[in-house]
Image (cartoon, helix red, strand yellow):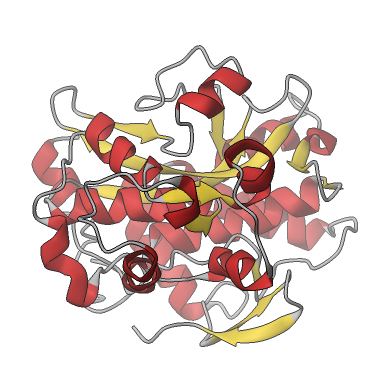
Amino acid sequence: MSVSAAASLNLDGSAAAQPLDFTRQSRFSDPGRHAALFDALPYDPPGAARVVQGLFVYEHVAEAWYDVPLDETRRGESHIRTVEEIIDVLLALDAAPLSMPRPPRCRVVGICRHYMLLSVAILRHHGVPARGRGGFGGYFSPETWEDHWVCEYWNAEEGRWALLDAQFDALWIERFHLDHDITDVPRDRFLAAADAWRKCRSGELDPARFGIEFSKLRGLWFVAGSLIRDAATLLGHEILPWDVWGAQLLAPRELSDDELAFFDDLALLTADPDANIGALRARFAADPRLAVPDLVFNALRQRPERLPKA
């Protein structure tokens, strides 16, 4: 696949007859009125990662690792959906240029999806094809595959897609004894949802190893939900990891034969999104089990929430 092919690949249905363009911002990644602030940011993967790491603090380790006390208001920042709103909150905390790392208490509280989304936004702003990928990281624990989101960007020099995990700053790398490059995460350390699904279905990996350890949510049903969220993200709907709609399950249960066949088919499409993006978009447009609605269910807040307008 050539660089031009990757760069010529249109986000979330605004021009349905055209191929998808991973250099265009989505309604979630668009910095909006803050776009000019991105002009001076580095967009090589290491530089983009440094910027993102200096602007976020990860919610679930903020207090223990970074000495950032969190009340409910600050924890609510992990539910921010758009880059424009992220920058609003960030500048209210500290008005320095985005290239300047903030002290942890002046960073936006987020989770892996936010590190992914801002990385994608920076790269797209500078014309680098980039997209979010939902799946499972195998570098949090030797026993489990943890629900995780990373940025996938086009490496023009090598003519391939590569994975950037900006969440892993120096402290994360030390804590987890990481031995791989966070700007080129090996494909056997992060499994996109389609790869995780197919390995579970083939019996190569145990579905009980996939999910979220701290909430004890694991199993094939969880991987199925990740499949839909990853596919939606590929189409420019970079939703929150706990948004639920359509065919996703809210609680653990066995999947029926029809459901297994449905998710098998979806995994085939998302395993090679560049070859199947047209079919994937058509499927989301036609199938109510997949189509991203105006209202989704926020499973953490246990309430429906409206997505930003396209």
Residue 173: % across, % down: 52, 22
Q: How many marks?
A: 0
Q: Residue at x 74, y 37 (%)?
A: 201
Q: Is residue 58 left or right of residue 273?
A: right
Quadrant occupied by the C terminus: bottom left
The percent coordinates of residue 183 (x first, y second) are: 35, 27
Residue 90 spot, x, y in % from top left: 37, 64
In the rendered image, the vertical position of residue 24 relative to residue 293, given as above or below: above
In this picture, residue 92 sits left or right of residue 122 = right
Residue 17, visible in the rendered structure: no
Residue 309 shows in this picture: yes
Q: Quadrant of residue 137?
A: top right
Query: What residue is at 21 percent from the left and 47 percent from the top?
Result: 99
Residue 44 lies, with reference to residue 232, above or below; the image says: above
Foreground of the two, 132 or 34: 34
Q: Residue furthest right?
A: 253
Q: Position of residue 23 (x, y in %)?
A: 18, 55
For this view, does 287 lie left or right of residue 103?
right
Q: Residue furthest top?
A: 179
Closer to us: 199 or 26: 26
Q: Which residue is pictured at 20% across the width and 35% down the height?
A: 1
